[in-house]
Amino acid sequence: MWWSYSLKEVEKDFEELQSELTELEKERERYKKEGEIPEGDLFLYTTEEFVQKTEISFKSQKKLLDKMTNKFKTILEYFGEETSNMSTDEFFGNFSNFLTSFQVCLEQLV
């Protein structure tokens, strides 16, 4: 089964996750400024490790997302398509249709 997840959706989801991480960091800063932290409250402790690991992961994922976006643009240019207008779904859908039609033609010739 073919499953689709467009590049625009990936970029949107990435931006939403980045925004949520930024909000968590702001919440941590507000919490620190409040002053006295109640005994047994582990919010800052547990979120510190999470934020550190997540920031590292996000930087790595951002590099991969940028690389994927650039490679997709290169593919579009190679096939003579507009890089600003075509979605991944549309491009790979067209490519799949072409391959299917080509296979049908080959079978008819044989």
Image: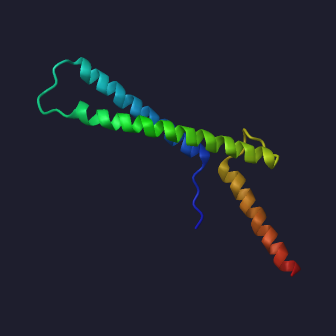
Residue 106 is situated, as x and y percent measured from the top left of the image, at: 84, 75
Residue 4: in sight, yes or no? Answer: yes
Task: Please count the marks in the image.
Answer: 0
The C terminus appears in which quarter of the rendering? bottom right
The N terminus appears in which quarter of the rendering? bottom right
Determine whether 88 is above or below 84 in the image: below
Residue 75 is situated, as x and y percent measured from the top left of the image, at: 74, 48
Determine whether 31 is above or below 52 in the image: above
Residue 81: in sight, yes or no? Answer: no
Q: Is residue 64 left or right of residue 58?
A: right
- The residue depicted at 33 percent of the width and 38 percent of the height is 50
Give the image quarter of residue 19.
top left
- The residue depicted at 45 percent of the width and 34 percent of the height is 18
How are the colours assigned in the image? rainbow
Determine whether 66 is above or below 104 in the image: above
Residue 34 is situated, as x and y percent measured from the top left of the image, at: 22, 18
> 86 or 73, which lies in front?
73
**Residue furthest to the right:** 109
Q: Is residue 38 left or right of residue 91?
A: left
- The residue depicted at 78 percent of the width and 44 percent of the height is 77
> 109 or 68, which lies in front?
68
- The residue depicted at 56 percent of the width and 45 percent of the height is 9
**Residue furthest to the left:** 39
